[in-house]
Image (cartoon, rainbow, N blue to C red):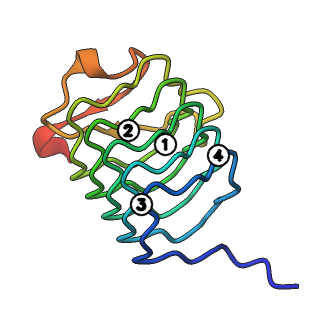
Amino acid sequence: MDVSPANFEGADLTSARLQQADLRRANLTGANMKSADLRMADLRGANLTGVNLTSADLRLADLRDANFEAAVLVSADMRGACIGGINLRGAVMTSVDMRGARMEHSEPTDAQIAIPPSMTRTDAPDDLTWVVGDDL
């Protein structure tokens, strides 16, 4: 049985309805997911490098250990998402709502999240380990 993760590299998933989708370890590199509905989706360990998630709905999604490097998350809704261990290096995050985002169940327990220099501490949950600017 083939248990390899899904490959959506470069796919046009604009406005896709992916609520509660199992996208663990999926390759979404360079995909266009503008306005996608990913509420409660499981994206643990997914590769979202360079993905356009402008206005995407990621409420309550499990994003642990996902790679959002160079992703565009302008006006994304990440309220209540589980964000332990995610990589946001080089991500564009303007007007992102992260209220109630959670760090629990992060592996390893001392996981850091790289936050783009443009993001302020008031934009993100209090329990983040901040790595900004030259530390990236």
The residue that disc 1 covers is 85
Q: Earlier in the sequence, mark 2 or mark 3?
A: 3
In the image, taking residue 57 as reference, residue 109 lies left or right, namely: right
The residue labelled by disc 2 is 113
Query: Which amino acid lies under the numbered mark 1 shown in the image of this protein?
Result: Gly
- Residue 70 vs residue 128, the one in the foreground: 70
Mark 3 or 4 closer to N-term? Answer: 3
The quarter of the picture where the N terminus appears is bottom right
Q: Residues within 10 Å of mark 3 (few under 14, many from 20)?
A: some
Q: Secondary structure under badge 3? A: loop
4 vs 1, front mark: 4
Instruction: Tell me the amino acid under the disc marked 4.
Output: Gln
Instruction: Give the mark nearer the N terminus: 3 vs 1.
Output: 3
- As measured in the structure, the alpha-carbon distance from the residue carrying label 2 to the one carrying label 1 is 6 Å
Q: CA distance from mark 2 to mark 3?
A: 27 Å
Q: Label 4, on which residue? A: 19
Q: Secondary structure at mark 1?
A: loop
Would you say 93 lies left or right of 66 here?
Answer: left
